[in-house]
Amino acid sequence: MPNIYRCRELLIKYKPPLIFTYEPTTWQIDILLTLFPWLKGFTILICKNPTKFESLFVPANLDEPHIDIDFFNFLRQLTPQTNIQVNQKIYVTRNDATTRRMLNESVLLDKLEVFGYKAFDMSKISFFEEMALFRSAKYVIYISGSHCMNTIFCPPSTPVCTIQSFKSVLSTKFLLNNFGVNNIEYQIPPENGKHLGHNDDFKIEVTDFLRFLKENRFI
C-alpha cells in the first residue's frame, strides 16, 4: 500500500491496470477505493492462475520489446534531491520482512563487504532515495521479490543478480532484461528433492554463491 502513495502521480498519469493474483472481495475493493479514491476508473485484472498471470507479461518472443520504454525513460529522467549515501555495489536485504528471509545473511554480508558491497533495506528509505540508490549502482544483488522493479532506475546493462529461493512460474529474467539490465538468477537448490515455498525462509550456500558471483564477474 505505501508504494501506491509513493507512485500516485505516475499511476494517475499512466493508469496501468491493477492486477490481482486472487479474487478480491467487494469489501476489499471498497476499502481500496476509500483509501485511494483516485483509483476509480482504473482497470482491474483478476488472474488467479499462475500460468495465465505469466502470459499477461511474457510475449511469444522474449526478444520483442513489451515494456513501455517512454514510461521508463520518464522515470529515469527524474532527478530527486536526496541525502542518501549511495554505493556502487548494492545488496538489497529483506531480513526485516516476515517471509523469505535469508537465515544466514550475516555470513554472506561479511564476505560481500570485502568486495565493496553494502546492504540496504528498502523499507527504511524513501521512494526517491531508492531511485538515487539504484541509479548510482554498478552491481545489484537482491532476493527475489518486488525489489526487482527498482532496477528500472539502473543505468542500461547494469549487472543484476536475483537470488531465487523458490521455484517460480514467473521468472524475473525476461522482465529485468527488458528493463535494459543484465539479469542472472541464482536458484536455491531443493531440500530433500523439494523446492521451498514462496514464503519460506532459507539458507544460502555461501561458498557456492560466491563462486557463482565470481563466474559472472560480480566479484
Image (spheres, rainbow, N blue to C red):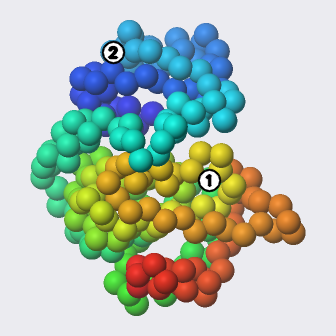
Count of numbered badges drawn on the protein: 2
Q: Which residue is depicted at the point 54% across and 56% down?
A: 144
Specify the amino acid type for callout 1: Thr
Q: Residue at x 26, y 59 (%)?
A: 156
Report whether 209 appears left or right of 193.
Answer: left
- Label 1 or label 2, whichever lies nearer to me, is 2
Q: Position of residue 214 (x, y in %)?
A: 47, 85
Residue at 26% from the left image edge and 39% from the top image edge: 69
Above or below 26: residue 74: below
Question: Taking 9 as reference, is 190 above or below it?
Answer: below
Numbered badge on residue 142? none
Could you say whether the residue bearing mark 1 is in a helix, strand or loop?
loop
> Is 175 left or right of 26, judged from the image as shown?
left
**Left or right: 128 with respect to 42?**
left
Which residue is at a point 37% across and 68% down the rendered structure image?
159
Residue carrying label 1? 98
| Frontmost residue, 196 versus 99 | 196
Locate the C terminus and report the quarter of the image it occupies. bottom left
Decide: few, some or many residues near mark 1? Use Cα within 10 Å; few <14, some 14-19, many ≥20. Answer: few
- Where does label 2 land, which residue? 38
Measured from the top left, where is residue 18 in percent x and y? 46, 24
Q: Is residue 66 above or below residue 207?
A: above
Sequence-wise first label, 1 or 2: 2
Is residue 9 found left or right of 93 in the rendered image?
Answer: left
Secondary structure at badge 2 equals helix
**Dividing the image into 4 quarters, which one contains the N terminus?**
top left
Quarter of image, res 193: bottom right
Q: What amino acid type is highlighted by mark number 2?
A: Trp
